[in-house]
Amino acid sequence: MKAFAAWHGSGRAMAVNTQLLRSSVLALACTGALIVAVESLVALGLLDPLIVPPPSAVTLSFIEGWQSGLYFRESLITVRRLFLGLLFATAVGVPLGMAMGLSRVGRAYFNPIVSFLFPLPVSSLIPIALTIFGLADAMYYSLVALATGILLTIASRDAVVNLDRTYIETARTFGLSRSKTFLKVVLPAVTPRIAHGAYTAFAIGVIVLMTAEIVVSSRGVGNILVLARLQHRVADMYAGIVLIGLLGTSLNMLTRRGGLLLARWESEWLNKQW
Amino acid sequence: MATQEPSCWMVSVLMRSFGRREALITTRALNALGAGTLLGSWWVLSATGSAARARYLPAPPEVFAALARGVADGDILVAFGETLHHFAIAYASAVVGGLTLGVLLGRFDLASRGLHPIISFLRTLPGVAVLPLMLLIFGFQPRAVGASAGFAAIWFVLLNTMRGVRSTHPTVVETAKVFRVSGPRMWLKVLLPSAAPQIATGLRTAMGIALVVAVSSEIVMGRGGLGAFIRRSQDTLQPASAYAGILLVGLFGVVLFQLAQLAEEKLIPWKGRG
């Protein structure tokens, strides 16, 4: 029986693997074809290299950016701004949201404030943040903190409000104290949903930070792009966009992993492919 | 916030001792209290601050006066019209492109697997990061802003349409086939109605993203629209006008969201039932 199960399991894993392999080969081929097509269109003079530079030039510029240490340095600055903002947002937003979820009074009191701040486009606050903080890094992470903090507050509030009442009733039946109910029942039940909220908030935080870096352009990944545009280095600009995309993708994957770790007992939302 | 604690505590005692009707009234009172705290602390902070603070925190009446002034001399209305124009370009292109590509990718599994890495890379790019590229292609035109906002929004329409088309239950399709439904009728009567709720979600999300990225791009470009209006006002030491612009953007977002919700309820009443 055990041997059968093992055989069966490995067979399924292999089938999944071959499918994955086939998809990856297909995807690689498509991406490669696109790059070759653009390269040859530029070489044939059908695309203006001042608007679309050949992929080979972009690749060279990208490699140079890493070798000179510029990309690493600026990425580090951007990531630090992002995480400081998110840290602050979590420290304020999650307890506030959970308090709103647990107490009807808290909810009634804070709801108008949250629902006023929620539809506000945070990137339109950049000019004002600039007047308050100047070019200091605090400007960047306060914007990130505001944008992500509101989303985290709402996610935490809704996670607690939508909690299945049976959990709490059951805990009460077993005579658990209030603090124990919170720690052992409420907290584990809401963590996956809050993690999902954090995942969404993170993506919004990246957008706000990038906008701020491009508008203000004092260091950071966005600044690479602005400088390249101002000096008409088109290939460098494309390379900068590739860097931003790769940074975004890897940070996304990282938070997804983090979320998976926090939400391993309720991971349906992470199983969606895309 | 600490000064509000005693009254909150009192209200919670009151809430426990009264019935449901009274609880509703206390909730309303707490709502008003929360909104009052927000407005009051804004007012107090702006009234007691130094001249430096007045540069980023004008008093509420000043903001409303600036809004009235802007409407009277047409300044803010022109900016609003430009933002509307940018938003319309962005949203129209995102909807048309996203729906077409989404249907195609939903139908042809091979194509969607081949394009997966390209799409998931492009999707993580913040809209503002491709603005320099769009400026290169379109020049300093409204189309450049529209294109970057449309680029940011299109993925939400595309992916939701694709998922929606795929999610039609095979039994439903088979049943329709038994009744000899095929071709355009299959699309109009079976596939699209069952995909509609998911598509609507994508369309609504894309709406918010298109607006936010359009305004952010205007801030970056510094010309045309409410984004540029906000930036210019703040740069020329007219923070009240900047706040008026931010308020208008937020209001527009809320109105759009409400309209989308209304349209959803009217057009696809079956959403949220299954």
Image (tube, coloured by chain):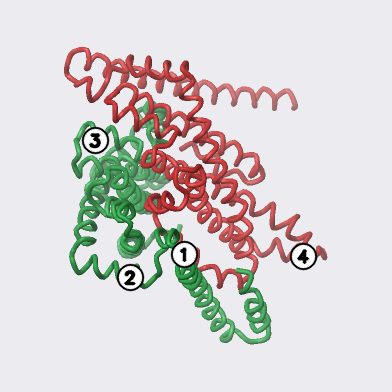
Which chain corresponds to the colour red?
A
Q: Which amino acid, mark 3?
A: Leu
Identify the chain of the residue marked 3, using the numbered disc in the image: B
Q: Nearer the viewer, residue A195 or B202?
A: A195
Q: Nearer the viewer, mark 1 or mark 3?
A: 3
Label 1, label 4: how many angstroms apart (C-alpha)? 29 Å
Q: Which amino acid, mark 4?
A: Arg
What residue did someone put label 2 on?
Answer: B64
Q: Is residue B218 left or right of residue A244?
A: left
Where is residue B136 drawn, in percent x and y? 23, 31
Where is residue B208 drawn, in percent x and y? 36, 53
What residue did someone put label 3 on?
Answer: B135
Query: Which residue corresponds to the image point at 56% horizontal and 72% vertical from the top-left?
Result: A109
Q: Nearer the viewer, residue B119 or B217?
A: B217
Q: Is the residue marked by circle 2 packed among few (<14), some (14-19), or many (20+) residues within 10 Å?
A: some
Label 2, label 3: how many angstroms apart (C-alpha)? 35 Å
Q: Nearer the viewer, mark 2 or mark 1?
A: 2
**Circle 1: element type:** helix
Do dots 4 and 2 share one subunit? Answer: no
Q: Which amino acid, mark 1?
A: Ser
Q: Is the residue marked by circle 3 packed among few (<14), some (14-19), or many (20+) residues within 10 Å?
A: many
Label 2, label 1: how many angstroms apart (C-alpha)? 20 Å
Identify the chain of the residue marked 2, using the numbered disc in the image: B
Which chain corresponds to the colour green?
B
What residue did someone put label 1 on?
Answer: A115
Do dots 2 and 3 share one subunit? Answer: yes
Give the label on residue A178, or none.
Answer: 4
Identify the chain of the residue marked 4, using the numbered disc in the image: A
Where is residue B96 drawn, in percent x and y? 24, 44
Query: Which residue corresponds to the image point at 56% horizontal and 60% vertical from the top-left?
Result: A158
Count how many numbered circles sit on residues in the image: 4
Identify the chain of the residue marked 1, using the numbered disc in the image: A
